[in-house]
Amino acid sequence: MNPELYPWLVSAWSQLQGRRANLPHALLIQGRPGLGKTALARLFAQRLLCEGPVGGDLPCGECAACLWFEQGNHPDFRILEPEALSAAEAEPRATEGEPRKREGEAASRQIRVDQVRELQDFLAIGTHRGGLRVVVVRPAEAMNVATANALLKSLEEPPPKTAFLLVSSAPDRLLPTVRSRCQRIAVAPATTAEAAGWLRARGLQDAEAALAYAANAPLAALEDAEERAVRDSLVAGRLAGGSRDALELADACQGIAPARVILWLQKWIVDLVLARTAGSIRYHQRHASALRALAGPLVLERLLRFERSLVEAAAVAQHPLNPRLFLEDVFLRYAQIWEASSG
Ligand SMILES: [Zn+2]
């Protein structure tokens, strides 16, 4: 079975093909979030490792190397990513109220320096299959200074037959010394037409609206659509109707990871701020008049303070000790935005 190349990645893919004949030690694949840059890096890694008939642009999907790769155990491939990401993929939907499988310390959202040390052990030996060895680092901005400096040694004196593929939505946050070691591949944003066509082919109604909500990132729009019913019950069913009952609002978010709820609430607040400051509504066009009515009596300073508090909430939303209480607390503070202005 051949892996999928998303239609908006075709141009970045052909740039990558162009580098294959004279492969640099490190490539930096950069572009906006939600485009599938990691999927692109993985597909390119698989193509580099593929042992099938020479010639095709895509990996053959049938040789031993491709089968190992697809099962996640190719011996010459490594992916360096924060533990929180690997954990999230192993368990994509956190169920509210259910105790988390991982007790104690939350999984790291950074790439730790000992992960780079383990990688160096892997780089110290020859390749298993005699071909290339490929390392994907994603997102590269999850490396702190210590981690980046540890990796830099391998980028400066690359082991033979090794290709590093760094993936980043925020290349400005990388150490300049890391950036300068990489050749860049820019992933252009999807056009609305191609992204909407792709979403419709996946059975998504209202693809344009879904894209607008997801800031034009097609993969985020698809993920979002799966949660649409719950989001509608929160946003259209309650927030737009003026509900500020923290318990009822938390009830409406049953079964959704708190980090997603915080993201929805952040977008709702952006629109409340825009409605209050007479700008145009960005995410919730359908609720423009409700937003203006809700925003009318608000004290802008309180609204902005709540918006800032959501940034802090987002930082702990991956692993709150008690998801239900965490959300109730956030919604209580949401209700308080109005209390001050009505008194
Ligand atoms: Zn193959």
Image: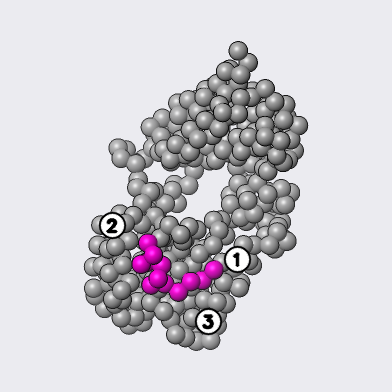
Quadrant in which the N terminus appears:
bottom right
Query: Taking the image as drawn, is residue 206 in sight?
Result: yes
Q: Position of residue 90 (x, y in %)?
A: 42, 50
- Spatial separation of the CA atoms under disc 1 and disc 2: 31 Å
Query: Taking the image as drawn, is residue 136 in sight?
Result: no
Q: Which mark is drawn over residue 18?
A: 3
Does residue 3 lie above or below 342 as drawn? below
Q: Position of residue 259 (x, y in %)?
A: 49, 40
Residue at image coords 50%, 87%: 54
Q: Amino acid at mark 1?
A: Ala
Does residue 268 lie above or below 135 as drawn? above
- Where residue 121 sits, quadrant-wise, is bottom left
Q: Amino acid at mark 2?
A: Ala
Residues shaded magenta: 175-186
Judging by the rendered image, the residue that carries numbered circle 2 is 146
- Spatial separation of the CA atoms under disc 2 and disc 3: 33 Å
Inspect the magenta stretch and tell me whether residue 182 lies in it. yes
Q: Position of residue 325 (x, y in %)?
A: 45, 26
Residue at image coords 62%, 49%: 214
Considering the numbered disc 3 on the image, is that residue within a helix, a strand or a loop? helix
- Where residue 297 sits, quadrant-wise, is top right
For label 1, the crowd category at 10 Å Cα-Cα, with few meaning under 14, some 14 to 19 and many 20 or more, is some
Residue at image coords 72%, 41%: 280
Judging by the rendered image, the residue that carries numbered circle 1 is 188
Considering the numbered disc 2 on the image, is that residue within a helix, a strand or a loop? helix
